[in-house]
Image (spheres, rainbow, N blue to C red):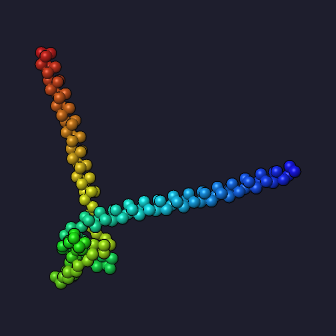
Amino acid sequence: MWMNLLAEEAQNKSSFMDYLWIIVIIVVLVAFFVWSYISQKKKQKAFNETINAIKPGSKVKTIGGIVGEVVEINEEEGTFVLKTGDSEGNYSYMKFDKQAIYQTDAKPEAAEAKKEEAPAAEEKKEEAPAAEEKTEESADSKDETQDK
């Protein structure tokens, strides 16, 4: 009788452990899919910012391997005109969809704006100590005049 109770108790524990492993595997898979989704969204956002940063004069490589310089951009149609050719002046102009861009030298504007803000903040930091030094110098000169 005692043996039957122990056997039943052992079976109950093993079935709980089986469910525990299944739950752990499901949680890991869900975490992987969520991480993958978030990572893909970040890459897509960065790519869209880069495409939107393209201006006439930017160098571009298309998904077909054509390399050239952007001449004109049509935001309404989502297209651009690419000037390509050799160094002898034989140029061709082709119209592409913006999604055909594979690589570009254009940088997103947000990054450029941050770079412009950083030097301005550093200049303000440098100006503040200079102002403090002037107030200290004027206080020292007042003390000297009072001592005389």
Residue farthest to the right, as pictured? 1
Residue 104 picture location, percent across and down: 28, 69
Residue 2 spot, x, y in % from top left: 86, 49
- Residue closer to the observer: 31 or 5: 5
Judge by depth and name the residue closer to the eye, 36 or 6.
6
Q: Is residue 1 above or below residue 70?
A: above
Which corner quadrant holds the C terminus?
top left
Is residue 84 something one can see in this rendering? no
Query: Vertical placement of 94 versus 46: above or below?
Result: below
- Which of 138/116 is in front? 116
Q: Looking at the image, is 63 positioned above or below residue 115? A: below
Residue 6 appearing in the image: yes
Of residues 52 and 13, the one drawn nearer to the viewer in this rendering: 13
Q: Quadrant of residue 125?
A: top left
Looking at the image, which residue is at 64% across and 55% down?
A: 20
Quadrant of residue 127 within the rendered picture: top left
Q: Residue at x 27, y 72 (%)?
A: 98
| Residue at point 13%, 16% (across, down) | 146
- Residue plotted at (16% across, 19% down): 143
Asked which quadrant contains residue 21, the reply is bottom right
Give left or right: position of 33 versus 22: left
Callout count:
0
Residue 22 position, x and y percent, is 62, 59
Q: Left or right of 4: which side holds 43?
A: left
